[in-house]
Image: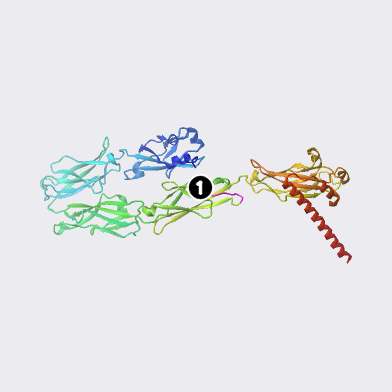
Amino acid sequence: FPFLLPLFYRALCEPIRYSIPEELAKGSVVGNLAKDLELSVLDVSSRKLRVSAEKLLFSIDRESGDLLVKDRIDREQICGERRRCELQLEAVVENPLNIFHIIVVVEDINDHAPQFHKDEINLEISESVSPGTGTILDSAKDPDINMNSLSKYQLSPNEYFSLVVKDNPDGGKYPELILKKTLDREMQSSHHLVLTALDGGDPPQSGTAQIRILVVDANDNPPVFSQSVYRVSIPEDVPPGTSVLKVSATDQDEGFNAEVTYSFLGVTDKAQHVFSLDSATGNIVTHQPLDFEEVERYVMDVEAKDRGSLSTRCKVIIEVLDENDNSPEIIITSLSDHILEDSRPGMVVALFKTRDWDSGENGKVTCNLSRNVPFKIHSSSNNYYKLVTDGDLDRELTPEYNVTITATDRGKPPLSSSTTITLHVTDVNDNAPVFQQSAYLVHVPENNPPGASIAQVSASDPDLGPNGQVSYSIVASDLEPRALSSYVSVSAHSGVVFAQRAFDHEQLRAFELTLQRLLVAVRDGGRPPLSATATLLLVFADSLQEALPDLNDHPTPSDPQAELQFYLVVALALISVLFLLALNKILSTKKAR
């Protein structure tokens, strides 16, 4: 472990961070990733350094190890209204396999000008309205953030109206038109103003809206909402048609001027598709299914306007509550599906991560493996995991494993998903060849033709490929090596023993060669090879009785195992002779009857 720890140290530490402005040109350098990972330029290719993400916005320069911009990076498109925009990447290297976490912070640039929902704002204001009365105007929108966001409003110079900028409860700003001087419809029935919205960029960008004011006769009381801000929370699984809340405004005027209608003001297209507002009752109803993972909160302005065109507005904030409606996902980021059977426990086989779009307990995930497999899961960080070996592997017993990973969230009831990966166990030369018999007794017939087969030895090896291919050879005998080669030989591939000459028992008896022992070896093709031996006892005599005297005079092997094999062969030969004699006697008796 102390030797392996440096290989994983960087992966266990804080992620590597870079900061770039949005809209960088393709090919721009984010940073030297190889240097920050303490890799050499050669390591970039040899260890196959690469980055992975759900959308590949970056790539690796194979020659320098630089992290490069691969595609357009639009902060507003990627992160929307979030104040902090961070892209999560993973850097993967092999030999050994490991993963590193990278965070690229995308900084905002002033690439959007403020924009009003409508280019023209039409107002009707009664000539009886007192100076100091305010009319709320439509806000401008700017998707940029911080200093580049909407900063202020300006009104074209005029003698009747001024502008006040107020703060929204959600942190934005909206303009309010203030009457400075009493209007006189008979003197001037309409007014034309220009409203300008500016952001805080350097240089600032701006957007304009035309304000057209029609002066009408007396309606001196605007509607008043019962609340300035309405808040409500609803679960995301409510069906379409569910009533969310009801806004209410009253007007102190009477008759025609007291009739109030409601409408959304400056609401995004998304919100207008999801919710509908009854213009007469102020009831807000869901129009489409909600999705917490898409939008967590809706902030909308509702305007109440009387028949005299006096209006007021309120803020409606709808919080969407998360339900456990998303199963966890399992994403395999790297896989080594061939494993040597002599791999030690703790070797990394695969890297994967989990993702659950739900929040809170509904989004917390635990992982488990199928039972009775020699693998286990190590939790890394940020829902990243390593699949490692956790036991001895034996290809001859189990050549492959189908490992099922199950991810389960903590929702009530919990949701889960599974994925199965197939891991192949690769053969190593861990089995020596085994003879079918430890010793062979061979009676060699007299006057056999030269080159004839007189016996066959056989061994097997359960390993694969060259590790399981066996070859035979004679490694020792009672004869001198030169003499041995003139009497017998063995086929390296088949194990067939051949006589090299015709044998005359009387001549062999004269030289005391009626009984000879050979030590036959078998070896596999592994590196290094493994081997085994067997004893081959050759009897050159008309009968076993003729060879028995030589057995007593034959020197016994110095190896205890070889000696045991020798006596086992003799015992087997004696039992065989006795069995044949008894069988012959029984057959003779039956024939005589």
- Give the residues drawn in magenta, as a range: 390-396
Q: Position of residue 424 (x, y in %)?
A: 56, 48
470 left or right of 592 in image? left
Badge 1 crowding class, 10 Å Cα cut-off, few under 14, some 14 to 19, many 20 or more, is some
468 left or right of 517 in image? left
Q: Position of residue 296 (x, y in %)?
A: 32, 52
Residue behind mark 1: 388
Colour option used:
rainbow
Quarter of the image where the C terminus is located: bottom right
Q: Inspect the magenta stretch and tell me whether residue 512 lies in it.
A: no
Q: Inspect the magenta stretch and tell me whether residue 394 lies in it.
A: yes
Q: Position of residue 475 (x, y in %)?
A: 74, 41
Q: Going by the picture, which residue comes out furthest to the bottom?
A: 593
Q: Nearer the viewer, residue 559 or 545?
A: 559
Q: Residue at x 74, y 49 (%)?
A: 565
> Which secondary structure type mostly characterizes the magenta part of the structure?
loop
432 left or right of 237 in image? right
Q: Quadrant of residue 344?
A: top right
Q: Nearer the viewer, residue 325 or 447?
A: 447
Question: On screen, 91 above or below 125?
Answer: above
Q: Amino acid at mark 1?
A: Val
Q: Position of residue 28 (x, y in %)?
A: 40, 34
Q: Quadrant of residue 26?
A: top left
Q: Secondary structure at mark 1?
A: strand
Marker count (numbered) = 1
